[in-house]
């Protein structure tokens, strides 16, 4: 069997599948799924924590400050959704060692589906004895300080094309002979897209991520009830428009319908949809990543680290700083959504 055969059989049985079903099979199939079979970081794409240690350090300090601001609860969950190689968590923990009592009070919990990446995380984070969970509803009922970087972009999306005044046709993936082909299902009203009739026209394409609201609801319910904070970082915008599904292999963009299970598939995150799914008892705030990191003092930290570097290492360090913050690189494309209980002090970096 191959993933191509699995998908072809599924289509033969059920008819054309949604983009979300296609993404779920490609990324999470128990035998052939992209994330299940490999550690893709570095090989196919690179993320902010892998670019520079400064990213995780500043996020760790922002969350540790929120923990202090909220009365330093003596037991809390320090969680990460989709921790990759564990680099972000390791950098957060190292920086937060400066905040007395924080690490001692933390139960580290990692939401991860990939057995390959769990092994990498286990080796990296052994000293803090993390606990792994499969679903957000398994997060413990206690104060929750949580980060998710490039997690939501890996969750399957559905795509709809506007038809006329009120209807939408869903993109589906079917078979033409032996080849996968994208087509459109019949037009129908879509409840979840009622608010998009105001800002779209005939032919426009919009996306929804069906599994994201439930994760947000689980996270924000704990933050609202037990206190805490969430930092969700990803590429995307407030209300996305157009086809943002992309496949990446070895750092290069490839055809979405080829390289099944061998390329990463991601889509832009619609932060409006995330914020809308949050508990009414939390406050949420969106800011570009570059602005967030500048407010947290990345430039001062970069200068401090630069003192011990020279030659190509110094050049790489300067390039990494620029890559994370410049509006021409990740600074604007990536956004940070911060969530705190209503009435709590804002997160450091998201004050304004
Ligand atoms: N946050 C890391 C890794 C980002 S890659 C970093 O910034 O470097 C996406 C991560 O989310 C991987 O760890 C992947 O295995 C995990 N992941 C993807 N889909 C998931 C899902 N549905 N449930 C849990 N984890 C998932």
Image (cartoon, rainbow, N blue to C red):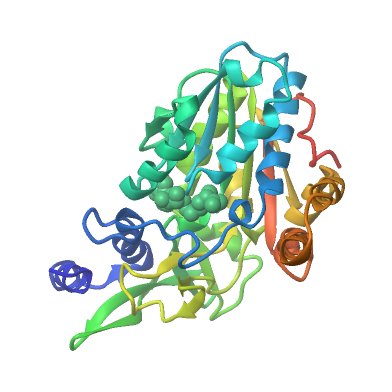
Answer left or right for 64 relative to 185.
Answer: right
Look at the picture and state if 334 lies above or below 281: below
x then y, percent, for residue 14 = 18, 67
The quarter of the displayed image where residue 123 is located: top left
The residue lying toward the viewer, choosing from 212 and 41, is: 41
Dividing the image into 4 quarters, which one contains the N terminus?
bottom left
Residue 171, located in which quarter of the rendered image? Answer: bottom left
Image quarter where the C terminus lies is top right
Tell me the residue at 78%/55% (across/down).
Answer: 309
The residue shown at (38%, 37%) is: 135
Q: Is residue 26 left or right of residue 123?
A: left
Please provide percent x and percent y for residue 251: 51, 73
Give the quadrant of residue 74: top right
Q: Nearer the viewer, residue 13 or 28?
A: 28
Does the rendering let one see residue 341? no
Residue sitting at x 44%, y 25%: 129
Residue with the most extreme bottom position: 177
Compare residues 69 and 206 and report the one nearer the observer.
69
Q: Specify whether residue 218 is in view.
A: yes
Where in the figure is residue 291, as x and y percent of width and height? Answer: 81, 53
Which residue shows up at 45% across the image and 35% down it?
110
In this rendering, position of residue 272 left or right of residue 39: right
- Rendered position, 250 above or below 134: below
Residue 136 at x, y percent in the picture: 43, 35
Residue 147 to residue 199: above or below: above
Q: Relative to 341, is 39 on the left or the right?
A: left
Q: Nearer the viewer, residue 137 or 16?
A: 137
User: So how many labels did they put on this image?
Assistant: 0
Vertical order, 28 against 92 (above or below): below
């Amino acid at each position: 069997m191959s993933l191509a055969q699995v998908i072809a059989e599924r289509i033969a049985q059920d008819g054309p599948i949604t983009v979300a079903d296609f993404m779920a099979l490609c990324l999470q199939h128990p035998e052939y799924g992209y994330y299940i079979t490999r550690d893709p970081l570095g090989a196919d794409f690179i993320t902010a924590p892998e670019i520079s240690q400064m990213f995780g350090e500043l996020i760790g300090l922002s969350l540790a400050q929120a923990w202090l601001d909220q009365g330093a609860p003596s037991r809390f969950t320090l969680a990460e959704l989709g921790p990759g190689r564990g680099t972000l968590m390791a950098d957060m923990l190292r920086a937060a060692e400066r905040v007395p009592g924080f690490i001692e009070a933390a139960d580290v919990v990692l939401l991860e589906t990939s057995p390959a990446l769990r092994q990498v995380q286990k080796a990296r984070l052994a000293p803090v004895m993390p606990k792994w969970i499969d679903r957000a509803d398994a997060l413990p009922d206690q104060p929750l300080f949580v980060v998710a970087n490039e997690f939501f972009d890996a969750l399957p999306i559905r795509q709809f094309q506007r038809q006329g005044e009120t209807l939408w046709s869903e993109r589906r993936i079917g078979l033409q002979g032996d080849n996968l082909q994208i087509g459109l299902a019949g037009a129908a009203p879509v409840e979840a897209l009622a608010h998009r009739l105001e800002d779209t026209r005939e032919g426009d394409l919009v996306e929804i991520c069906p599994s994201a609201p439930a994760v947000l609801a689980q996270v924000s319910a704990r933050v609202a009830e037990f206190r805490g904070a969430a930092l969700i970082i990803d590429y995307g915008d407030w209300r996305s428009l157009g086809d943002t599904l992309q496949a990446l292999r070895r750092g290069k963009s490839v055809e979405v319908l080829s390289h099944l299970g061998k390329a990463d598939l991601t889509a832009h995150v619609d932060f409006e949809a995330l914020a809308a799914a949050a508990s009414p008892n939390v406050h949420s705030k969106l800011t570009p990543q570059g602005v967030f990191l500048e407010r947290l003092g990345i430039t001062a930290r970069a200068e401090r680290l630069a003192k011990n570097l020279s030659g190509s290492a110094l050049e790489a360090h300067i390039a990494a700083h620029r890559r994370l913050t410049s509006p021409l690189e990740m600074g604007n494309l990536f956004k940070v959504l911060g969530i705190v209980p209503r009435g709590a002090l804002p997160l450091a970096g998201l004050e304004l």
